[in-house]
Image (cartoon, helix red, strand yellow):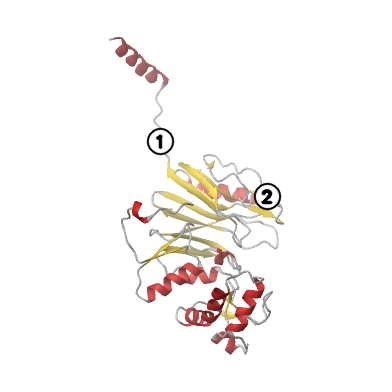
Protein backbone atom coordinates (compact mmCIF):
# COMPACT_ATOMS: atom_id res chain seq x y z
CA UNK A 1 0.00 0.00 0.00
CA UNK A 2 1.55 3.36 -0.99
CA UNK A 3 2.30 5.87 1.76
CA UNK A 4 1.11 9.36 0.81
CA UNK A 5 3.24 12.36 1.81
CA UNK A 6 1.62 14.31 4.63
CA UNK A 7 1.61 17.57 2.68
CA UNK A 8 -0.95 16.25 0.17
CA UNK A 9 -3.42 15.10 2.83
CA UNK A 10 -5.75 17.30 4.86
CA UNK A 11 -7.16 15.86 8.08
CA UNK A 12 -10.11 17.08 10.12
CA UNK A 13 -8.50 16.09 13.42
CA UNK A 14 -5.02 16.02 14.90
CA UNK A 15 -3.94 13.67 17.68
CA UNK A 16 -0.48 13.13 19.15
CA UNK A 17 -0.65 9.32 18.95
CA UNK A 18 -2.35 6.86 16.60
CA UNK A 19 -2.22 3.13 17.30
CA UNK A 20 -3.24 0.78 14.49
CA UNK A 21 -4.83 -2.43 15.72
CA UNK A 22 -7.00 -2.89 18.84
CA UNK A 23 -5.88 -6.38 19.75
CA UNK A 24 -4.06 -7.09 23.01
CA UNK A 25 -0.84 -5.28 22.04
CA UNK A 26 -2.60 -2.22 20.64
CA UNK A 27 -5.06 -2.01 23.54
CA UNK A 28 -2.28 -2.32 26.13
CA UNK A 29 -0.22 0.34 24.33
CA UNK A 30 -3.23 2.69 24.23
CA UNK A 31 -3.92 2.04 27.91
CA UNK A 32 -0.31 2.83 28.86
CA UNK A 33 -0.32 6.05 26.82
CA UNK A 34 -3.66 7.12 28.28
CA UNK A 35 -2.33 6.61 31.82
CA UNK A 36 0.45 9.05 30.95
CA UNK A 37 -2.02 11.71 29.82
CA UNK A 38 -1.57 11.20 26.07
CA UNK A 39 -4.62 11.53 23.83
CA UNK A 40 -4.81 8.34 21.75
CA UNK A 41 -6.68 7.39 18.59
CA UNK A 42 -6.96 3.59 18.43
CA UNK A 43 -7.84 2.20 14.98
CA UNK A 44 -9.22 -1.29 14.31
CA UNK A 45 -10.23 -2.86 10.98
CA UNK A 46 -12.34 -5.69 12.46
CA UNK A 47 -15.94 -5.31 13.68
CA UNK A 48 -14.87 -6.44 17.18
CA UNK A 49 -11.55 -5.33 18.74
CA UNK A 50 -10.27 -8.79 19.62
CA UNK A 51 -7.24 -9.46 17.44
CA UNK A 52 -5.36 -12.74 17.30
CA UNK A 53 -5.11 -12.90 21.11
CA UNK A 54 -8.83 -13.67 21.48
CA UNK A 55 -8.44 -16.55 19.02
CA UNK A 56 -5.45 -18.08 20.80
CA UNK A 57 -4.51 -19.42 24.20
CA UNK A 58 -3.56 -15.88 25.22
CA UNK A 59 -0.22 -16.95 26.70
CA UNK A 60 2.27 -14.15 27.44
CA UNK A 61 5.98 -14.84 28.06
CA UNK A 62 7.68 -12.88 30.82
CA UNK A 63 10.61 -13.32 33.18
CA UNK A 64 10.95 -12.35 36.84
CA UNK A 65 7.28 -11.58 37.52
CA UNK A 66 5.73 -11.58 40.97
CA UNK A 67 3.50 -14.45 39.84
CA UNK A 68 6.56 -16.53 38.97
CA UNK A 69 8.24 -15.75 42.29
CA UNK A 70 5.06 -16.74 44.14
CA UNK A 71 5.06 -20.04 42.23
CA UNK A 72 8.74 -20.64 43.07
CA UNK A 73 9.96 -20.27 39.47
CA UNK A 74 13.50 -18.92 39.12
CA UNK A 75 13.60 -16.86 35.92
CA UNK A 76 15.52 -13.86 34.59
CA UNK A 77 15.21 -11.48 31.60
CA UNK A 78 18.54 -12.83 30.30
CA UNK A 79 17.14 -16.37 30.11
CA UNK A 80 14.00 -15.16 28.32
CA UNK A 81 16.10 -13.10 25.90
CA UNK A 82 18.18 -16.18 25.04
CA UNK A 83 15.04 -18.31 24.54
CA UNK A 84 13.46 -15.71 22.22
CA UNK A 85 16.59 -15.52 20.06
CA UNK A 86 17.04 -19.29 20.01
CA UNK A 87 13.39 -19.95 19.11
CA UNK A 88 13.71 -17.44 16.24
CA UNK A 89 16.91 -19.23 15.16
CA UNK A 90 18.79 -15.96 15.49
CA UNK A 91 16.67 -14.24 12.84
CA UNK A 92 15.03 -11.70 15.15
CA UNK A 93 16.25 -8.24 16.12
CA UNK A 94 18.38 -8.98 19.20
CA UNK A 95 18.03 -5.46 20.62
CA UNK A 96 14.24 -5.71 20.51
CA UNK A 97 14.35 -9.20 22.05
CA UNK A 98 16.49 -7.82 24.90
CA UNK A 99 14.13 -4.89 25.46
CA UNK A 100 11.02 -7.12 25.48
CA UNK A 101 12.64 -9.49 27.99
CA UNK A 102 13.69 -6.67 30.32
CA UNK A 103 10.27 -4.97 30.26
CA UNK A 104 8.17 -8.14 30.43
CA UNK A 105 7.94 -8.50 34.21
CA UNK A 106 6.91 -4.88 34.76
CA UNK A 107 4.23 -5.23 32.08
CA UNK A 108 2.73 -8.41 33.54
CA UNK A 109 2.78 -7.04 37.10
CA UNK A 110 1.12 -3.80 35.93
CA UNK A 111 -1.64 -5.59 34.00
CA UNK A 112 -2.36 -8.06 36.81
CA UNK A 113 -2.22 -5.66 39.75
CA UNK A 114 -3.35 -2.31 38.36
CA UNK A 115 -5.87 -3.43 35.75
CA UNK A 116 -6.87 -6.79 37.24
CA UNK A 117 -6.15 -8.79 34.11
CA UNK A 118 -6.89 -12.41 35.15
CA UNK A 119 -3.35 -13.74 34.83
CA UNK A 120 -1.67 -16.71 36.43
CA UNK A 121 1.69 -18.38 35.92
CA UNK A 122 1.62 -21.60 33.89
CA UNK A 123 3.59 -23.99 36.07
CA UNK A 124 2.58 -27.39 34.69
CA UNK A 125 4.51 -27.39 31.41
CA UNK A 126 7.42 -25.68 29.65
CA UNK A 127 6.45 -24.01 26.38
CA UNK A 128 8.23 -25.59 23.35
CA UNK A 129 11.57 -23.87 22.76
CA UNK A 130 11.70 -22.32 26.24
CA UNK A 131 14.12 -23.33 29.00
CA UNK A 132 11.95 -21.91 31.82
CA UNK A 133 8.24 -21.62 32.59
CA UNK A 134 7.95 -18.12 31.10
CA UNK A 135 4.28 -18.30 30.13
CA UNK A 136 1.43 -16.42 31.84
CA UNK A 137 -2.24 -16.85 30.89
CA UNK A 138 -5.79 -16.48 32.13
CA UNK A 139 -7.24 -19.30 34.28
CA UNK A 140 -9.12 -20.66 31.28
CA UNK A 141 -6.00 -20.35 29.08
CA UNK A 142 -8.17 -18.71 26.45
CA UNK A 143 -7.22 -15.30 25.07
CA UNK A 144 -10.79 -14.01 24.96
CA UNK A 145 -10.64 -13.70 28.75
CA UNK A 146 -7.88 -11.08 28.40
CA UNK A 147 -9.83 -9.20 25.75
CA UNK A 148 -12.99 -9.15 27.90
CA UNK A 149 -11.03 -7.02 30.37
CA UNK A 150 -9.12 -4.91 27.84
CA UNK A 151 -12.18 -4.00 25.75
CA UNK A 152 -13.67 -2.32 28.82
CA UNK A 153 -10.54 -0.19 29.05
CA UNK A 154 -10.83 1.19 25.50
CA UNK A 155 -13.68 3.14 23.85
CA UNK A 156 -16.64 1.45 22.23
CA UNK A 157 -19.52 -0.75 23.34
CA UNK A 158 -19.16 -4.48 23.84
CA UNK A 159 -21.40 -7.38 24.84
CA UNK A 160 -20.29 -11.01 25.23
CA UNK A 161 -22.54 -14.05 25.60
CA UNK A 162 -20.59 -17.02 27.03
CA UNK A 163 -21.56 -20.50 25.94
CA UNK A 164 -22.62 -22.39 29.11
CA UNK A 165 -19.92 -24.80 30.20
CA UNK A 166 -17.50 -23.68 27.46
CA UNK A 167 -14.76 -21.07 27.09
CA UNK A 168 -16.21 -20.03 23.73
CA UNK A 169 -19.09 -17.62 23.20
CA UNK A 170 -20.62 -14.90 21.05
CA UNK A 171 -19.58 -11.25 21.24
CA UNK A 172 -20.40 -7.98 19.51
CA UNK A 173 -18.55 -4.66 19.57
CA UNK A 174 -19.39 -1.31 18.00
CA UNK A 175 -17.98 2.18 18.22
CA UNK A 176 -21.63 3.30 18.51
CA UNK A 177 -23.80 2.71 21.53
CA UNK A 178 -26.48 0.04 21.17
CA UNK A 179 -29.02 -1.66 23.39
CA UNK A 180 -28.14 -4.85 25.22
CA UNK A 181 -28.63 -7.69 22.70
CA UNK A 182 -31.74 -9.84 22.97
CA UNK A 183 -30.87 -13.52 23.50
CA UNK A 184 -32.75 -15.91 21.22
CA UNK A 185 -32.64 -19.63 22.25
CA UNK A 186 -32.27 -21.92 19.25
CA UNK A 187 -33.60 -25.45 18.57
CA UNK A 188 -31.48 -28.16 20.21
CA UNK A 189 -30.87 -31.82 19.51
CA UNK A 190 -33.00 -34.37 21.34
CA UNK A 191 -30.14 -36.90 21.29
CA UNK A 192 -28.38 -37.81 24.58
CA UNK A 193 -24.99 -36.25 25.25
CA UNK A 194 -25.83 -33.05 23.42
CA UNK A 195 -23.82 -29.90 23.98
CA UNK A 196 -25.42 -26.86 25.69
CA UNK A 197 -28.25 -25.21 23.75
CA UNK A 198 -27.05 -22.74 21.14
CA UNK A 199 -28.23 -19.14 21.33
CA UNK A 200 -28.11 -16.10 19.08
CA UNK A 201 -27.43 -12.49 19.94
CA UNK A 202 -30.06 -10.25 18.32
CA UNK A 203 -28.45 -6.83 18.01
CA UNK A 204 -30.10 -3.60 16.85
CA UNK A 205 -27.58 -1.15 15.39
CA UNK A 206 -29.25 1.80 13.71
CA UNK A 207 -32.03 0.56 11.43
CA UNK A 208 -30.47 -2.88 10.88
CA UNK A 209 -31.03 -5.93 13.08
CA UNK A 210 -28.15 -8.41 13.27
CA UNK A 211 -28.28 -11.99 14.47
CA UNK A 212 -24.84 -13.07 15.66
CA UNK A 213 -24.64 -16.88 15.44
CA UNK A 214 -22.53 -19.97 15.99
CA UNK A 215 -24.79 -22.75 14.76
CA UNK A 216 -24.74 -26.48 15.44
CA UNK A 217 -22.77 -28.97 13.36
CA UNK A 218 -25.82 -31.10 12.53
CA UNK A 219 -26.93 -30.14 9.03
CA UNK A 220 -30.66 -30.54 9.65
CA UNK A 221 -30.41 -28.91 13.06
CA UNK A 222 -28.51 -25.82 11.89
CA UNK A 223 -31.16 -25.28 9.14
CA UNK A 224 -33.87 -25.43 11.82
CA UNK A 225 -31.90 -22.90 13.83
CA UNK A 226 -31.67 -20.59 10.80
CA UNK A 227 -35.42 -20.83 10.25
CA UNK A 228 -36.02 -19.94 13.91
CA UNK A 229 -33.81 -16.84 13.57
CA UNK A 230 -35.31 -15.83 10.22
CA UNK A 231 -38.79 -16.02 11.72
CA UNK A 232 -37.75 -13.66 14.51
CA UNK A 233 -36.27 -11.18 12.02
CA UNK A 234 -38.93 -11.33 9.32
CA UNK A 235 -40.01 -7.96 7.95
CA UNK A 236 -36.97 -6.07 9.30
CA UNK A 237 -33.82 -5.06 7.42
CA UNK A 238 -31.60 -7.73 8.93
CA UNK A 239 -28.58 -10.00 8.59
CA UNK A 240 -27.73 -13.40 10.08
CA UNK A 241 -23.96 -13.51 10.34
CA UNK A 242 -21.45 -15.87 11.89
CA UNK A 243 -20.27 -19.49 11.86
CA UNK A 244 -23.04 -21.51 10.20
CA UNK A 245 -21.22 -24.87 10.38
CA UNK A 246 -23.21 -25.60 7.22
CA UNK A 247 -22.21 -27.70 4.23
CA UNK A 248 -24.06 -26.81 1.02
CA UNK A 249 -26.45 -23.92 0.44
CA UNK A 250 -28.52 -22.35 3.21
CA UNK A 251 -31.84 -21.57 1.52
CA UNK A 252 -34.10 -19.42 3.68
CA UNK A 253 -37.12 -17.75 1.95
CA UNK A 254 -36.74 -13.98 1.84
CA UNK A 255 -33.02 -14.04 2.65
CA UNK A 256 -30.12 -13.76 0.20
CA UNK A 257 -26.68 -15.25 0.77
CA UNK A 258 -24.42 -12.18 0.47
CA UNK A 259 -21.31 -13.54 2.19
CA UNK A 260 -17.97 -14.04 0.44
CA UNK A 261 -17.84 -17.00 -1.94
CA UNK A 262 -14.65 -18.55 -0.61
CA UNK A 263 -13.55 -21.08 1.96
CA UNK A 264 -13.22 -19.76 5.50
CA UNK A 265 -12.10 -22.99 7.17
CA UNK A 266 -10.02 -26.02 6.20
CA UNK A 267 -10.95 -29.31 7.84
CA UNK A 268 -7.78 -31.10 8.98
CA UNK A 269 -5.97 -28.16 7.30
CA UNK A 270 -6.85 -29.74 3.93
CA UNK A 271 -10.57 -29.82 3.07
CA UNK A 272 -12.03 -26.35 2.31
CA UNK A 273 -15.38 -25.36 3.84
CA UNK A 274 -17.36 -22.14 3.54
CA UNK A 275 -18.64 -22.12 7.12
CA UNK A 276 -18.75 -18.38 7.87
CA UNK A 277 -21.66 -16.75 6.04
CA UNK A 278 -24.20 -13.95 5.97
CA UNK A 279 -27.87 -14.16 4.99
CA UNK A 280 -29.47 -10.75 4.47
CA UNK A 281 -33.08 -9.57 4.25
CA UNK A 282 -33.95 -6.10 2.94
CA UNK A 283 -30.27 -5.23 2.56
CA UNK A 284 -27.81 -4.83 -0.28
CA UNK A 285 -24.16 -5.83 0.03
CA UNK A 286 -21.64 -3.63 -1.79
CA UNK A 287 -18.59 -5.59 -0.60
CA UNK A 288 -17.91 -9.07 0.77
CA UNK A 289 -14.48 -10.45 1.54
CA UNK A 290 -12.33 -12.21 4.12
CA UNK A 291 -9.35 -11.34 6.28
CA UNK A 292 -6.25 -13.50 6.52
CA UNK A 293 -6.10 -16.45 8.89
CA UNK A 294 -4.89 -15.65 12.39
CA UNK A 295 -4.31 -18.24 15.13
CA UNK A 296 -7.96 -19.26 14.65
CA UNK A 297 -8.80 -21.91 12.06
CA UNK A 298 -11.51 -19.63 10.60
CA UNK A 299 -11.09 -16.60 8.36
CA UNK A 300 -13.04 -13.54 9.57
CA UNK A 301 -15.51 -12.22 6.98
CA UNK A 302 -16.06 -8.54 6.18
CA UNK A 303 -19.21 -7.06 4.60
CA UNK A 304 -20.52 -3.62 3.68
CA UNK A 305 -24.31 -3.69 4.11
CA UNK A 306 -26.89 -0.98 3.40
CA UNK A 307 -30.65 -0.88 3.56
CA UNK A 308 -32.16 -1.61 0.15
CA UNK A 309 -34.30 1.17 -1.31
CA UNK A 310 -37.70 -0.22 -2.20
CA UNK A 311 -38.59 0.13 -5.89
CA UNK A 312 -42.15 1.12 -6.69
CA UNK A 313 -43.67 -1.40 -9.12
CA UNK A 314 -46.26 0.11 -11.44
CA UNK A 315 -49.07 -1.74 -13.16
CA UNK A 316 -48.18 -2.69 -16.79
CA UNK A 317 -51.06 -0.52 -18.14
CA UNK A 318 -49.79 2.45 -16.13
CA UNK A 319 -46.28 1.97 -17.55
CA UNK A 320 -47.70 1.81 -21.09
CA UNK A 321 -49.59 5.07 -20.59
CA UNK A 322 -46.40 6.79 -19.37
CA UNK A 323 -44.50 5.60 -22.45
CA UNK A 324 -47.33 6.84 -24.73
CA UNK A 325 -47.20 10.29 -23.12
CA UNK A 326 -43.45 10.46 -23.81
CA UNK A 327 -43.93 9.42 -27.47
CA UNK A 328 -46.65 12.06 -28.04
CA UNK A 329 -44.47 14.71 -26.45
CA UNK A 330 -41.60 13.81 -28.82
CA UNK A 331 -43.74 14.53 -31.93
CA UNK A 332 -45.05 17.88 -30.77
The answer to whether residue 246 is visible is yes
Quadrant for residue 35, please give it. Answer: bottom left
Residue located at (45% from left, 78% from top): 115
Quarter in which the C terminus is drawn: top left
Q: Which mark is residue 272?
A: 2
Q: Decide which of tag 2 and tag 1 comes sooner along the chain.
A: 2
As measured in the structure, the alpha-carbon distance from the residue carrying label 2 to the one carrying label 1 is 37 Å
Residue 96 lies, with reference to residue 216, above or below; the image says: below
Q: Is residue 111 left or right of residue 175?
A: right
Percent across and percent down for residue 313 are 41, 28
Q: Secondary structure at mark 2?
A: strand
Of residues 95 and 231, the one drawn nearer to the viewer in this rendering: 95
Using a 10 Å C-alpha cutoff, classify the residue at mark 2 as few (fewer than 14 neighbours), some (14 to 19) or many (20 or more). Answer: few
Marks 2, 1: nearer the viewer: 2
Residue located at (63% from left, 55% from top): 216
- Name of the residue lying farthest toward the top: 331
Q: Secondary structure at mark 1?
A: loop
The answer to whether residue 236 is visible is no
Residue 234 lies, with reference to residue 177, above or below; the image says: above
Report the residue marked by disc 1: 310
Percent across and percent down for residue 240 are 52, 49
Percent across and percent down for residue 94 are 58, 74
Residue located at (63% from left, 69% from top): 91
Q: Is residue 229 left or right of residue 158?
A: right
Using a 10 Å C-alpha cutoff, classify the residue at mark 1 as few (fewer than 14 neighbours), some (14 to 19) or many (20 or more). Answer: few
Amino acid sequence: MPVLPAEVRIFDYAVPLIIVGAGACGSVAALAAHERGVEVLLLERDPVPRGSTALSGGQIPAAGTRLQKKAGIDDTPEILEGDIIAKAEGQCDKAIARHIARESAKTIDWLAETHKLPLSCIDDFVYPGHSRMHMHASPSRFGAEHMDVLTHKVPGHYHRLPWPGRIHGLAVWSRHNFATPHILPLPASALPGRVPRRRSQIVQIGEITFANVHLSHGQLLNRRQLLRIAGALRGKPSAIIGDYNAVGPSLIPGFADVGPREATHFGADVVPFRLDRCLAHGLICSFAGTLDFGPSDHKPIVLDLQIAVARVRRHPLQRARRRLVKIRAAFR
